[in-house]
Image (spheres, helix red, strand yellow):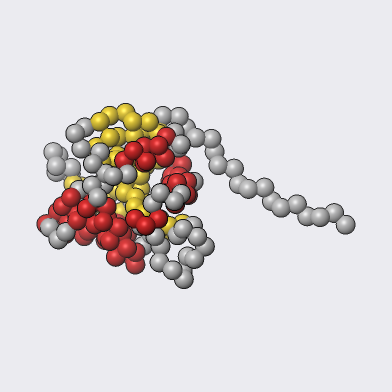
Amino acid sequence: MLRPAHIGHLALLRSLIRDAARDGAFDPALAWDSPAATRFFAELRQALKTGYFVVEDTTSRSVRTVAVPGYVYWADETAGSEPPVGFGLFRAIDDGYELWLTGLEAHLRGRGHGRAMLNALFSTPTGRRTKQMRVRRSARTAAVLEHLLAEHGFTATRESERETRFVRVAPLPPVEPPAAPRRPLH
């Protein structure tokens, strides 16, 4: 189950991001208190509070806002009574969105929850317009994530020393709403 992410979820996201940084999925500087982590989490706080990042282009020094819609994930229907166990944040790009950050509690990995969370994320209006995702090659879950992304029409298009860029090459069919239950005839 997904719900929109908000500022009240910052502690959860910080914890999951720090754990993932220690596992190689995010910049290692985010794993502890560092100047990079301080700046990143301040920007993340702003994004959760307003739904936008303010980004400065380093070459032109121009400033623009970038939409950052996000969701938190529960592994079952305990939303509200238990804390969420995962998240996904999207970032607007020129022609759609990038699944920018995603994380799941470590004890739930390998049990189908990552697949379920990605299915839910890519079923949102933002998720259906998602065109790319970058995966750090050092992440322990990189191979699993590559397989799960392929299920959603993504393919690896470019590799650098640190990351692999995945692009959705074929549009997915539109998600059809479930059929209404039939009323018994009397």
> Where does residue 2 sit, x and y in percent of width and height?
46, 57
Res. 122 in view: yes
Q: Quadrant of residue 169?
A: top left
The residue under the point 12% across, 58% down is: 34
**Which one is nearer the viewer's eye here, 113 or 100?**
113
**Which percent across, then down, holds residue 16?**
30, 58
Can residue 51 be seen by looking at this rendering? no
Q: How many numbered markers are drawn?
A: 0
Q: Residue furthest bottom?
A: 81
- Horizontal side of 14 relative to 149 (left or right) equals left
Q: Residue furthest left?
A: 35
17 left or right, relative to 96: left
Query: Which residue appears at 35% of the width and 44% of the height?
Result: 99
In the rendered view, tell whether residue 50 sits above or below residue 165.
Answer: below
Q: Quadrant of the C terminus?
A: bottom right
Residue 162 in percent (x, y) is at 20, 37
Q: Hey, which quadrant is residue 52 in on the image?
A: bottom left
The residue nearer to you, when weighing 94 against 138, is: 138
Residue at 16% across / 59% down in the picture? 32
The one nearer the camera, 49 or 63, is: 49
Residue 100 located left or right of residue 110: left
Q: Position of residue 97 (x, y in %)?
A: 37, 42
**Residue name at image x 36 percent, y 41 percent:** 145
Q: Where 169 falls versus 66 (above or below)?
A: above
